[in-house]
Amino acid sequence: MRSPLTLAESLRATHAELMAEDPRVFVIGEDVGLLGGAFGVTKGLLERFGPERVRDAPISETAILGAAIGAALLGMRPICEMQFVDFLYVGLDQLLHQAATAHFASGGANSVPLVVRANYAVGPASGPQDTGTLYGALLQFPGMTIVIPTGPTDAAAMLRQAVQDPNPVLFLEPRQLYRAGDPVDDLEPLCMTKARIVRKGSDLTCTAVGGMVIRALAAAERMAGQDVSVEVIDLRCVMPLDEQTVINSAASTGRLLALDEAPRGGGLAAEVLALVSETNATRRLPVLVRRLTGAAAPVAYAPALAKEAVPTEAAIEAAMLELARTTRA
């Protein structure tokens, strides 16, 4: 069954549950208390748990992360909220060189059970400073798990797992899905690092995360009317990538479309294609591959131009149809 909550409501309820269950869990970020978070995810937590556990921080991402990393090293389980993933850039040194490496640099003696929440994606009139994705760039920095929920059921389960993880988790929330429900019915519980096949198909595999999963499902539904059966995989976890689910699906369908709203250069789509291409070489699997990504340009402020910066449903459908009709050698 689908969750009766939206993604934002599910995150809010899960925050409250985790804080009630474990006094080590606290929230810190800009406007997480009095305002309830920039998008209302932490609304009501200050009134219930007080300012010691719901901490409004100054406008300093380095201060937020520094305080949270120190607390995590001492046994607390902080949840940081970054208003936009773009704001995380100024604190990447602490996140990547302190939090992500602490366990390995200490020979396993230290752990940093830290969750950093941030929303991402192109939104109405956001402009180039508030529309980043970031996750593709972070594939170069091991030591941290990066997850992206697509609906309220997954969001609740993944946030709970992230808080319980002994090492840092970057929890990215698709901004356009905050008011949305589950994309499909009957979502069974999964480990947060496991991909989910949200639609079965036999002619073509499409991988995606976040809001692109919803668009892939819509395009796949229209493809069925043209006798093209598309299998859609919600990757859910960007790092580490669930390689086996992707490889098995691509080997079965013989075609792979790697869909991503991030810009084309490098990143998640390129990693998925490289994975399957390497498997082609070693297993001699005749899999045709293609990627469809966001534009390699800053996102414009004008809504009509911003809309074209990421793959539209029409573009996804056209890419699926072209790939499905391509003859394998």
Image (spheres, rainbow, N blue to C red):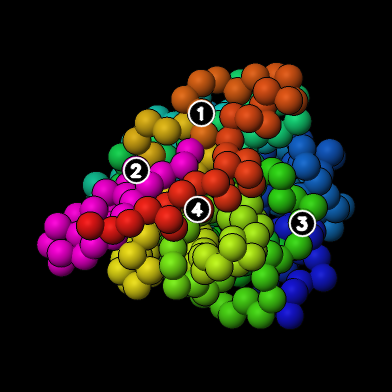
Is residue 279 rendered magenta in the image?
A: yes
Residue at mark 1: 295
Q: Amino acid at mark 2?
A: Ala
Q: Residue at x 21, y 65 (%)?
A: 285
- Picture disc at residue 180: 3
Check disc 4: other Cα within 10 Å, few if <14, some if 14-19, many if 20+: many
Q: Please state if 14 lies on the left or on the right of 229 as rendered.
A: right
Is 26 a magenta residue?
no
Q: Position of residue 256 (x, y in %)?
A: 39, 57
Q: Nearer the viewer, residue 270 or 231?
A: 231
The alpha-carbon separation of the residues under discs 1 and 4 comes to 18 Å
**Amino acid type, residue under disc 4 in the picture:** Met
| Residue 61 horizontal/vertical position (percent) | 57, 29
Checking the image for residue 320, the label placed there is 4
At x 39%, y 35%, the residue is: 137
In the image, which is nearer the foreground, mark 1 or mark 4? 4
Give the crowd class for mark 2: few <14, some 14-19, many >=20 residues within 10 Å. Answer: some
> What distance separates the C-alpha of mark 3 from that of mark 2?
28 Å
In the rendered structure, which segment of residues is drawn in magenta?
Answer: 268-293
SS category of the residue bearing label 1? loop
